[in-house]
């Protein structure tokens, strides 16, 4: 019988345990795949120094397993960051932010020596952009940023009712042609009022683990 998407997510989350270095601090992402990783990490909780969480929800889940959650300011180094993605390419460029945690995820990824992205194989694409690109914006700038995004050819939708852990809003941008993810990531971050966007191209993943029908494929 074919594996479900959840079974693939679970398998890839378990495979990520091989990247957990004992006696170090681990960065932990947000979302359903990251949640499976947290559940698996519980079995190793006495072997690590602690974790840094990319969202309040992740911190809560880590704590519910008795896994120590550290303040990022108290941490010199994060050995590895494990997180999911909404889309990924073979160049290890990603779209993230489906769970609205993109800014904290980008900060933890920036601090981490290695970024291991874990997804099921439905997330692998040739060109990014079918998944609407999430952008975190300062509330006051929402309409202005939306107008600037339209000028770039995008079709932004306000994710109504969602407030990020940083107190900001999310615009989901449809119809962006993401042929040069590094360039677009920089360009979008120049719009006044944008906190950051969900393109992880300037700091891509270092390893992409893809859960599929025949097990876990490693791209690096
Ligand atoms: C949250 C994210 C998630 O990694 C992304 O949305 C994937 O989620 P899931 O593992 O539930 O498919 O970027 O902001």
Image: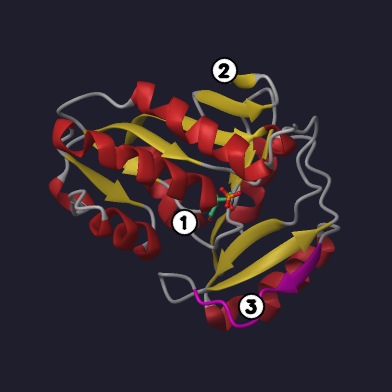
Front-most of residues 51 and 165: 51
Q: Is residue 18 above or below residue 84?
A: above
Front-most of residues 83 and 36: 36
The residue range painted magenta reads 155-163
Front-most of residues 18 and 147: 18
Q: Is mark 1 within 8 Å of ligand 1?
A: no
Is residue 203 visible in the rendered image? The answer is no
Q: Position of residue 125 (x, y in %)?
A: 77, 33
Q: Which of pointers 3 and 1 lies earlier in the amino acid sequence? A: 1
Q: Which of pointers 1 and 2 lies earlier in the amino acid sequence? A: 1
Residue that numbered label 3 is attached to:
142
For discs 3 and 2, the disc positioned in front in the rendered view? 2
Q: Position of residue 152 (x, y in %)?
A: 81, 57
| Residue lying at 60% horizontally and 83% vertically, measured from the top left | 161
Q: Mark 3 and mark 1: span between their CA atoms?
A: 16 Å
Is residue 128 visible in the rendered image? The answer is yes
Q: Which mark is residue 215?
A: none
Q: Mark 3 and mark 2: span between their CA atoms?
A: 39 Å
| Residue lying at 67% horizontally and 68% vertically, measured from the top left | 171
Q: As drawn, is 40 to the left or to the right of 185?
A: left
| Residue lying at 69% horizontally and 32% vertically, measured from the top left | 121
Q: Which mark is residue 103?
A: 1
Let me know if residue 174 is in the magenta part.
no
Q: Is residue 96 above or below residue 169?
A: above
Q: Position of residue 164 (x, y in %)?
A: 48, 71
Res. 5 image quadrant: top right
Mark 3–mark 1 contact, CB under 8 Å?
Answer: no
* Quarter in which the C terminus is drawn: top right
Q: Mark 1 and mark 2: span between their CA atoms?
A: 26 Å
Q: Which mark is residue 218?
A: 2
| Residue lying at 65% horizontally and 54% vertically, measured from the top left | 188
Packing grade of label 1 (10 A; few <14, some 14-19, many >=20) is many
């Amino acid at each position: 019988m074919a594996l479900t998407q959840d079974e693939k997510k679970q398998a890839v989350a378990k495979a990520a345990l091989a990247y957990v270095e004992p006696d170090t601090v681990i960065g932990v992402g947000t979302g359903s795949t990251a949640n499976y990783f947290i559940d698996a990490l519980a079995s190793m909780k006495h072997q690590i120094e602690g974790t840094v969480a990319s969202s309040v929800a992740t911190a809560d889940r880590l704590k519910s397993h008795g896994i120590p959650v550290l303040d990022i300011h108290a941490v010199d180094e994060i050995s590895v960051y494990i997180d999911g993605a909404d889309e990924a390419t073979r160049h290890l460029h990603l779209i993230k932010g489906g769970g609205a945690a993109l800014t904290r995820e980008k900060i933890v990824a920036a601090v981490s020596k290695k970024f291991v992205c874990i997804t099921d194989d439905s997330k692998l694409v040739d060109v990014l952009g079918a998944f609407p690109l999430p952008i975190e914006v300062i509330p006051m700038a929402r309409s202005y940023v939306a107008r600037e995004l339209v000028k770039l050819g995008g079709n932004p939708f306000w994710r109504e009712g969602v407030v990020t852990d940083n107190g900001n809003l999310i615009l989901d941008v449809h119809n962006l042609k993401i042929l040069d993810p590094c360039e677009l990531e920089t360009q979008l971050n120049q719009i006044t009022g944008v906190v950051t966007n969900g393109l992880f191209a300037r700091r891509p993943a270092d390893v992409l683990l893809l859960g599929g029908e025949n097990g876990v494929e490693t791209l690096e």
